[in-house]
Amino acid sequence: MSRSWQSRAWGTISTYVFWVFMTLLTLIPIWWMFVVSMRTRVELFGRPNLMLNRLYLENYSNVLTDSAFQRYMTNSLVVSTANALLVMILALLATYALSRYKLAGRDNIFFWLITNRMAPPAAFLLPLYIMFTRTFRLGDWTLFDTQLGLILLYCVFNLPFAIWLLKGVVDGIPIELDDAAMIDGAGLWGVLRHVIIPLAAPGLAVTGILSWIFAWNEYLFAANLTSVVARTITTALAEFVTVTGTNWGELAAMSMVTLVPSAIIVIFAQRYIVMGLTFGAVKE
Amino acid sequence: MRNPRVGWALLSPTLIILLIFGFAPFVYVLVVGFFDWNVFAAEDGLRFNGLDNFRRLVFDELFLSSVGLTIRFAVFAIASEIVLGFALAQMLTRNFPGKSLFRIIHTFPLMVAPIAVGAIWRLLVIPGFGPVPFFLDRWFDLTYQIGTYPDQALMTSVIMDIWHWTPFVTLTMLAGLSSIPREPVEQAKVDGANRLQVFWYVTLPFLRPVLLTTVFIRIMDAIRTVDEVWMLAGGGPGTRFTGIYIWRVTSPAASADWGYGSSVSLITLYLTIVLCWLLFIAISGRRKGEVE
Amino acid sequence: METGKPPPPQGKRGESIKENGFLPFYTNAFDRVFISLVILIGIHLLWLRFMEPTLPIELATALSLVIGFYVMRRG
């Protein structure tokens, strides 16, 4: 009797030791960046000290009051938010169509969607650059270096993901509810507004949140398809290293600011991340 | 009652956006890949040159070595992630107080922007003040400099990838493990199977679809990896992976040889599409003789 | 993810799904064309790398057409 109690106690203790260890492995790199962001240039060199010496906020205030950084930040916020809203609307309509109407070639549309999501963005940079600078132009205005360009472009990887996340949700809403609403005289918009949207609201919210974070995190398109006006926060991070003489403290502060939305989302939408990342191929 | 035309109308905005920004670029590289198009040449414009771009590509040492490097990177990273992720998922199937907190922290790296992941690891390994080179030198007398030693740079990228993506494997494995029905496992135990046998003959076959999905998704991610590795090492030796190579060749700012850039894109897309299709076959359950 | 034994998928018009081909999964016409194309591209690339100075590329085309035909018929 006592032996099994003992072994269970050991099991519990080793579980906790293991998880505390894993948590440290996850957090120490981030903690180090936080420490760097709290130091002056001089304090950084010498023996690395993982402890925080003092609260030194100048890196943050330098970054946050910098007008270029503010512009990058605004661009990122505008692009991510607009893209997430657009993706939610379009994906809801598309999912409803795929779920309720008999459309020829639905399976092939699925395959094509996955390919869009998985294609290496670097492979499309050149044609997109040419389209953005030469094809879409009105007089002096081109799609290159505009927020609109990024908003539309990010749909390429966010829409497929959103549709396959929402597909399961909409398929789960009984079609009888649609029919009942239609018999009561509701049109297509009525059904969408009073049946589908309320019932799919949680899934829709998750779709929006994850699309938002994917757009916020994107780098390659933003780096190559904008130049001055529409640059986003991730490109700012990358440029920081190459162009200026690299003030590591400020780089760390900037990265910390970039992390904030991710942290919030992980805490509130953790369960749904896996669904979003695997196209619901692996159902929880 | 449900007119397919209405369905197509609802689907059309999505299709139009994806056709313009997803399909048109594909057609573009498909065509230009067979042309010679040097932007800075005396006469601007396309000249058809058949398979010459591909002839150059298959002998391009930079490209081939980038492929080799990517394969090494993918094998090391994905194998470790699968083993580690499976072990972690197994540990998360048990209940213990504080489990959800640990899981939330463990998931965090997944949502961090790749470029920020690169920045985080760069700060860790930078010579001069990064703790990793310092302590490796102090404790193991090891000179650690990713800018100089390609193998160290490769291993650092692998470890960074493991840090970033193991949580993903853990979450998919957890989903897979929790979908395994209880009865076969119990039955096998009653029949006297030990833990290894249960794992090999019961758990693993049930887990196979999830395992396949995860591996395919991770391989395609490895092909696409650019941001984090670029931020970590700036394309230094040992980290010139295929993604970075394509980016350098096709990047509008850095390259003038657009025809060749397109052919490189095409090859990568070819690999991606094949992998995608295999994934599709794997998850749509069309294998013959699946479970008995 | 379906864990049970999957039913063989039904073809849209019933005629294209093959169950007794040599490929390790059920294929329809689209799949077989796709596989043939993938093989065609692969063979051409390998040919350019290893065979070309001695043997002309047209042989690769011929070879992949034969294999493609075989996949279409027997896959």
Image (cartoon, helix red, strand yellow):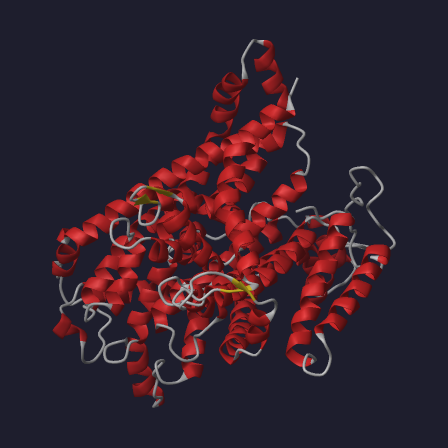
> What residue do we see at 22% from left, 59% from top?
A253
Q: Quadrant of residue B292?
A: bottom right
Viewer-proximal residue among A256 and A212: A212
Whether residue A93 sits left or right of residue A77 in the image: it is right
In the rendered view, would you say A102 is above or below B99?
above
Rendered location of residue B239, percent (x, y): 43, 75
> What residue do we see at 69% from left, 48% from top?
B284
Whether residue A58 sits left or right of residue C74 in the image: it is left
Viewer-proximal residue among A276 and B192: A276
Q: In the picture, which quadrant includes the N terminus of chain B?
A: top right
Rendered location of residue C4, percent (x, y): 75, 47
Rendered location of residue A23, percent (x, y): 39, 62
Q: Is residue A235 visible?
A: yes
> What residue do we see at 49% from left, 62% from top?
B224
Residue placed furthest toward the bottom: B141
Viewer-proximal residue among B2 and B39: B39
Whether residue C33 sits left or right of residue A265 in the image: it is right
Rendered location of residue B86, percent (x, y): 56, 62
Q: Is residue B94 visible?
A: no
Q: Quadrant of residue A30?
A: bottom left
Give the tally of numbered discs.
0
In the rendered view, would you say A183 is above or below A169?
above
Whether residue B131 sits left or right of residue A120 in the image: it is left
In the rendered view, would you say A44 is above or below C28?
below
Residue placed furthest toward the top: A184
Viewer-proximal residue among A201 and A189: A189
In the rendered view, would you say C54 is above or below B278?
below
